[in-house]
Image (cartoon, coloured by chain):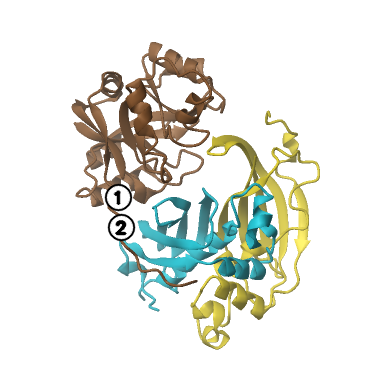
Chain colours: A brown, B yellow, C cyan
Amino acid sequence: MAHILDMHLHSEASDDSRAPVEAYLKWLARKRDERPLEGLVLTEHRQFHAAGDYRDLEDKYGVLILKASEVETDYGHVLVYGVNDDILKRFDFKNVRLPAQEVISEVARMGGIAMPCHPGRPTIGLIEHYGKRPPLEGVTGVEALNGGSKKGENERVAELISQYGYHAFGGSDSHLVSFVGLCATEFDRDIKNMDDLVDALRVGGYRPVDFRSPRPQTQVAPEV
Amino acid sequence: MALEFDRSIIGQVFDETSFPAVTTEEIVDYALSLGETNPLYIDEAAAATGPYGGLIAPPTFVSKLRAQKFTPEHLPKFGKFGFDGGRDLELYTPVRPGDELVMLSTIHDIYEKTGRTGSMYFIVIRNEVRNQKGEKVAVIDHRIMQR
Amino acid sequence: MNTFYFEEIEEGDELPAIDFFLSKDGVRQFAKTAGMYFPRFTDDEGARAEGLPGMIAPGVMSLGLLARMISDWNPAAVVKRIGTTFRSPVLPDRNVHLRGAVTQKNDEDHTAECDIWMENDDGERWVIGTATVVLPVKA
């Protein structure tokens, strides 16, 4: 059902976004020619949004909607896919200093997968921490293309990937409706549910895709 | 640093500031410094024939009001530097020249996150602005980031 | 300047962008009228002493500029709510671009929900936010 998914976005369930899931879906429907997405993975900040039920919206818009989480660790922010009760019992997602190595290892053992996001970002990205401490064991892939990055932050990731042999994926990190799907991930296999996604993320066969249009040259007025 | 403070501070009014009457000049200067060309904000004569029967201030004008006490006296400092993390404005009755505004301040929330610059503490100050008629003008949530 | 009605906008409409050079003098002028004439908003040295890379524009200036974009788009639009997150310090002496789009229309109260943001020449979004505006309806 889905080959191209936005792997990282925040809905109104996150503290810093006001975007309703349906508004994301309507925007995607409108922009389908430019952003041919078939799935969204909602990665709410410091929580798993258990109450969110998007089945009706999936049917209405024909888009796969999966739920995941973005947690904060001592090696930066990490996206957790395949969140289940065991994982939620083991880790307090509200803790902004989760031990990254335990999150990576334990989430994998409990059937999910934890993937560092925006690794090129200061403080909350993996690269800065790799410069100071040993690399994490068991990381299979990182978010190499993040729609919220500043200049240079995505570019820094290439070296990390070649050095450690990580798989690469992409996400918009959208907090606003109109940014949905600008960066995404293309999978070779068909993703039908979270189990498929976790399997695919483990073995590879995916890559980031960039749907941002080149910046137009704008005429700039001299001053306000 | 752990996020430890007396939570009873949340919701308590810690400041009430009354401001001198808003002047036309103040509104027009503010609007012009943002490059506004909307006659409602800058042209008294044109605004007089408009929907408000006179000049009004741009919606964000209330964000320039400064309370006497920015934060409560007993609030611990969570970081060396403070930065403006963001504002949320709910707007009701517009501000007009001659308005005598009163602002009540409360701590609305305090929480912690990590960002590009490290661990950050967010203090959300809620300011309620009323005019001399007791009408609600605005509720401003001001997120201050300390690190 | 054209005013227009709720019925004339569509979800997906872009607000006319404002692209301009944000000068240090422009920031100082705002700081003065907003009663914020503090070192971090007026000179590089003062800003560096506060741990900043150089003089910055006040967050409320970005907020005000984004509200101005709405006012330029439709002077009859009434802003009921506007919220912005200051993601990154806004450094003057360079181009900034104000952008926006209508993301949701509510027929019951004739409001439009808009995305609003400020970015630099590299497409870095320094300020992001949303606004709820009431538009006039046809009689």
Assign the N terminus of chain A to one quadrant of the image. top left
Examine the image and state in which quarter residue B122 appears: top right
Examine the image and state in which quarter residue B111 appears: top right
Residue at image x 39%, y 28%?
A: A68
State the residue lying farthest toward the bottom.
B45
Is residue C138 among the parts visible in the rendering? yes
Residue at image x 49%, y 18%?
A: A134
Q: Relative to A119, is B57 above or below?
A: below
Secondary structure, mark 1, is: helix
Q: Given contact means CB atoms under 8 Å apart, are the residues at marks 2 and 1 in contact?
A: yes
Please tell me how crowded label 1 is: few (under 14), some (14-19), or many (20+) other residues with Cα within 10 Å.
Answer: many
Number of labels in the image equals 2
- Residue A121 x, y percent position in the rendering: 46, 37
- Residue A95 x, y percent position in the rendering: 56, 26
Examine the image and state in which quarter residue C133 appears: bottom left
User: Which residue has dot 1 on it?
Assistant: A27
Please tell me how crowded label 2 is: few (under 14), some (14-19), or many (20+) other residues with Cα within 10 Å.
Answer: some
- Residue type highlighted by circle 2: Gly
Q: Chain of mark 1?
A: A
Q: Chain of mark 2?
A: C
C105 or A167, which is in the foreground?
A167
Residue at image x 38%, y 39%?
A: A154
- Residue type highlighted by circle 1: Trp
Q: Relative to B56, is A32 above or below?
A: above
The residues tagged by marks 2 and 1 sit, at their Cα atoms, a distance apart of 7 Å
Residue at image x 58%, y 59%?
A: C57
A128 or C100, which is in the foreground?
A128
Does A33 sit left or right of A124 as displayed? left
User: Which residue has dot 2 on it?
Assistant: C12
- Residue C114 x, y percent position in the rendering: 41, 58
Is residue A54 among the parts visible in the rendering? no
C109 or A79, which is in the foreground?
A79
